Image: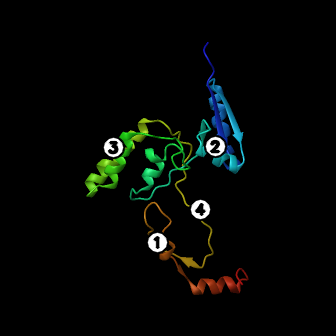
């Protein structure tokens, strides 16, 4: 017997239906009373800022070099009301580790501090991985070129791309461009 666990997932866009709906089905199969609530963007902002939800989609975009964004996403200062610290995390240990990351004097200190922060954040279990896309999908006219080797983890800064006048003229001749 006991009490049935109820969980509400809030979302303001149909984009994640294909991810959420099978997850809801799996939760129900596990005996959890799972509810999927589509709300408007204003409600989403209000409810997420005030932690009026059980679960929602969020992301924590980071640069390749750790920065002050760590404080926004995981620091205690933003735990009470924030659009960034969506789990309301308030931890002296995490705050201390963020300071170690921010004040690292060399690559070895940075690597050690980031690994410690990562392990500590994972121990909170506030995140359920949904999906991952390892490709960039960008449509562009075949008149732009870029170096064959692009920076890792990115499409490359558009400063590295260039315009090929011959290809542009060919597209114009074919009536594709004006």
Vertical comparison of 122 with 71: above or below: above
The numbered dot on residue 148 is: 1
The answer to the question of whether label 1 and label 2 lie on touching residues, with beta carbons closer than 8 A, is no
The kind of secondary structure element at disc 1 is: loop
Mark 1 or 2, nearer chain start: 2
Q: Is residue 128 visible?
A: yes
Q: Residue furthest top?
A: 1
Residue sitting at 50 percent across and 65 percent down? 155
Q: Quadrant of the C terminus?
A: bottom right
Mark 3 lies on residue: 116
The answer to the question of whether label 3 and label 1 lie on touching residues, with beta carbons closer than 8 A, is no
Q: Quadrant of the N terminus?
A: top right
Mark 2 lies on residue: 47
The answer to the question of whether label 3 and label 2 lie on touching residues, with beta carbons closer than 8 A, is no
How far apart are the two marked residues, 3 and 2, measured between alpha carbons? 31 Å
How far apart are the two marked residues, 3 and 1, measured between alpha carbons? 36 Å
Coordinates of residue 177 in the picture (x, y in percent): 70, 81
Vertical comparison of 178 with 16: above or below: below
Query: Which image quadrant for residue 9?
Result: top right
Mark 3 or 2, nearer chain start: 2
The numbered dot on residue 137 is: 4
């Amino acid at each position: 017997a006991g009490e049935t666990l109820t969980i509400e997932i809030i979302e303001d866009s149909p984009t994640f239906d294909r991810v959420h709906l099978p997850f809801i089905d799996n939760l129900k199969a596990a005996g959890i009373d799972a509810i999927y609530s589509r709300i408007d963007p204003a409600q989403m902002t209000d409810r997420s800022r005030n932690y009026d939800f059980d679960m929602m989609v969020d992301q924590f975009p980071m640069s390749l070099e750790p920065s002050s964004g760590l404080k926004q996403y995981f620091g205690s200062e933003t735990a009470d009301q924030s659009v960034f610290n969506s789990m309301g995390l308030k931890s002296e240990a995490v705050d201390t580790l963020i300071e170690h990351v921010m004040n690292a004097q060399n690559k070895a200190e940075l690597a050690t501090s980031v690994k410690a922060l990562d392990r500590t954040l994972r121990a909170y279990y506030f995140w359920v991985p949904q999906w991952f896309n390892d490709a960039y999908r960008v449509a562009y006219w075949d008149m732009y070129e870029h170096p064959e080797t692009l920076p890792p983890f990115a499409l490359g800064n558009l400063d590295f791309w260039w315009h090929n006048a011959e290809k542009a003229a060919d597209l114009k001749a074919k009536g594709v461009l004006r």
